[in-house]
Image (cartoon, grey):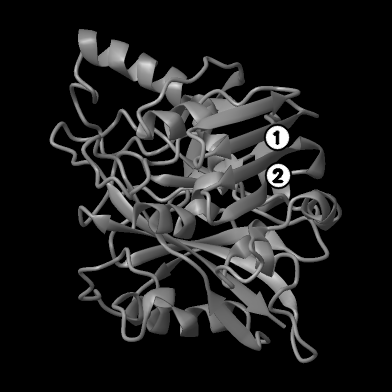
Amino acid sequence: MLRKTLIFGSAALTGSLAYFQAICYNEQKIAKEMDSAKKFNEKFDPNVTNAVDISMGFSCKGTKNCIDINFNQGKYEQKNDSKIPCAVEKFWKFLQNPTETQKYEQKNVTFLDARKNNPGDFHETGFTLIQLDNELDIKDWRTPVQEGKDVEIEKFHRQMEPHIRKLYPNVKRIVWTYNVIRDGDPNRAPTDQPTAQGPHLDYHQSDKLRREFHQVKPPIVPDSAFDKVESKILMGSMDNEDSKLGVLLGVWKPIYPEEICDRPLAVMDARTFSEDYQTANEVSMNFGEVGINILGGGIAHAPEQKWYYYPFQNTKEVLVFHQYSKDKFFANPHTSFFNKNCPQDTKYRKSVEFRVALFF
């Protein structure tokens, strides 16, 4: 069951490897802060919603990362032009095995309050916040629709699809892939993933590089496994004569508490992200029966990049952003961050995320 769950979540996990670039450093930094002071500011100021000079780990411009993890043999191999610090370390820590200390580039960024600083139209920035019609009575956010009929997650899909069609009126098909829970609690369920803590793209934007990568390493081995895996869809596995993949959206919402303060999801304005600042993360995982290969995207820092988040996003608000766009460079790098300006009784946030493929 664990192996199956890891495979279902592998797209999110491997796509998010870039965020682990900062996690070790930040955890050490936060631990030191907590040793000498409380986790959050002594006095919470609700009027201060721009998060200024937050330290983030970025890829180095022009580099490529190659990670090969073999769960079947209980070991991993790593080949790097520039090493990813926490991608393997956190993964390996989960399996209670040792790993290496690695290098990355640390930069300070500001996350603007998107409620006070209107970023602009969805088709210009790449992201928007959607208000759900009503709160959904869903207890099981983990089981994907691929597990069987009448799973609870379908309630969310049904409520979201009219909103997605409003954003893309010409869409012919909407395909939901796998969902994953992210939980900031250190005592999270073993199949849940930690909160993202560094800028990343789940999928590299270059179709050319993806084809070259998958010529050597197919998206899924055997090819018959898990049809609704994003790496296969990006290679055209679900295209037909009537419609082809045009956009892969990210869909993200809090599920606990009702409003979140710490570890909100932040996105970069797609207009401020250029192709020169995307790096390649070649990720291969062997589970024994199944192999998964994904070309993810790391983010190099540039001063012109603009980041936004929605303070106190609640469980009826859904953040929608671009993971991938066909035939144009248009995507939203994303991350969460430690927000020190929160009430002292702030709870660990738990969220659910999805990817949805749009065919035109």
Residue drawn at x 44%, y 30% is 92
Pointer 2 residue: 272
Residue extending farthest to the bottom is 242
Residue type pointed to by label 1: Glu
Quarter where residue 172 is shown = bottom right
Q: Residue 36: x, y in percent?
A: 22, 8
Residue type pointed to by label 2: Thr
Closer to the camera in the image, 39 or 284: 284
Quarter where residue 33 is shown = top left
Q: Which mark is residue 304?
A: 1
Lower sequence index among marks 1 and 2: 2
Say if residue 199 shows up in the picture: no
Q: Is residue 222 left or right of residue 55?
A: right
Tag 1's secondary structure?
loop
Q: Do the CB atoms of the residues marked 1 and 2 lie less than 8 Å apart?
A: yes
Residue drawn at x 48%, y 20% is 99
Q: Residue 306: x, y in percent?
A: 61, 40
